[in-house]
Amino acid sequence: MSQKYNREYYFNTVTRESRWEPPAARDQKLGAKHILVKHEGSRRPSSWREEHISRTEEEAVAKINSILQRLISKDNPERLEDIAAVESDCSSAKRGGDLGLFEPGAMQKPFEDAVLGLKVGKLSGPVKTESGVHIILRTR
Ligand SMILES: N=C(N)NCCC[C@H](NC(=O)[C@@H]1CCC/C1=C/[C@H](COP(=O)(O)O)NC=O)C(N)=O
């Protein structure tokens, strides 16, 4: 309890840092599965499925949107893992798009911000990073 401000605060005995907000959210590992569609402006415009990726960013967004429709379709929704294995330009495609658990700060900020903005089990809309355009499913 802080005498000066008469309110509870949190003290980390290892790092010896203190802060007002509870440690929970910021330090917890996150989990996500994703589908990445790269384009000519990606930081590494190459992948296991295509050596030289030349689609435009606009075409990548269009591809991501058509994949989104397959995931949320009413009559026969497909699983993200199945589409990732065929369509994702990330090496995680081999694991159904699963990135496993990762620390805050491990992924590019737009990706991490999108994950933090999702409830567990929810799907994002198109998310842009330097890698390309993603659809993200938060798993933890
Ligand atoms: N810690 C774990 N599990 N692995 C390291 C992740 C490094 C991280 N990666 C990303 O942020 C991109 C966007 C989200 C997923 C991701 C995957 C990229 C996308 O492909 P690339 O643009 O690299 O060719 N492939 C691997 O890194 C980064 N800080 O660059």
Image (cartoon, grey):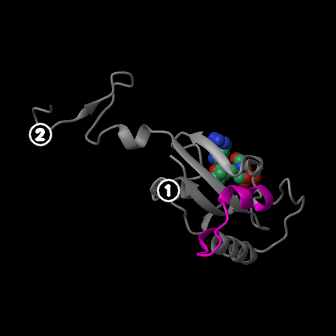
116 vs 100: above or below: below
Look at the numbered disc 2 and give the secondary structure of its residue: loop
**Residue at the far right in the pictured view:** 51
Residue 130 seen in the current view: no
Of the two numbered discs 1 and 2 on the same chain, state the one appearing first in sequence: 2
Look at the numbered disc 1 and give the secondary structure of its residue: helix
Q: Nearer the viewer, residue 24 or 69?
A: 69
Say which residue label 1 marks. 113
Which quadrant of the rendered structure holds the N terminus?
Answer: top left
Residue drawn at the location 73% of the way across and 73% of the way down:
63
Q: Is residue 76 magenta?
A: yes
Q: Amino acid at mark 1?
A: Asp
Q: Is residue 30 left or right of residue 36?
A: left
Q: Is residue 34 left or right of residue 138?
A: right
Q: CA distance from mark 1 to mark 2?
A: 31 Å
Residue drawn at the location 74% of the way across and 62% of the way down:
42
Mark carried by residue 102: none
Dot 1 beta carbon under 8 Å from ligand 1: no
Q: Foreground mark, 1 or 2?
A: 1
Q: Which residues are magenta?
A: 71-87
**Residue at the far top in the pictured view:** 14
Q: Is residue 95 magenta?
A: no
Say which residue label 2 marks. 5
Q: Quadrant of residue 2?
A: top left
Q: Amino acid at mark 2?
A: Tyr
Label 1 neighbour load within 10 Å: few <14, some 14-19, many 20+ = few
Q: Nearer the viewer, residue 124 or 82?
A: 82
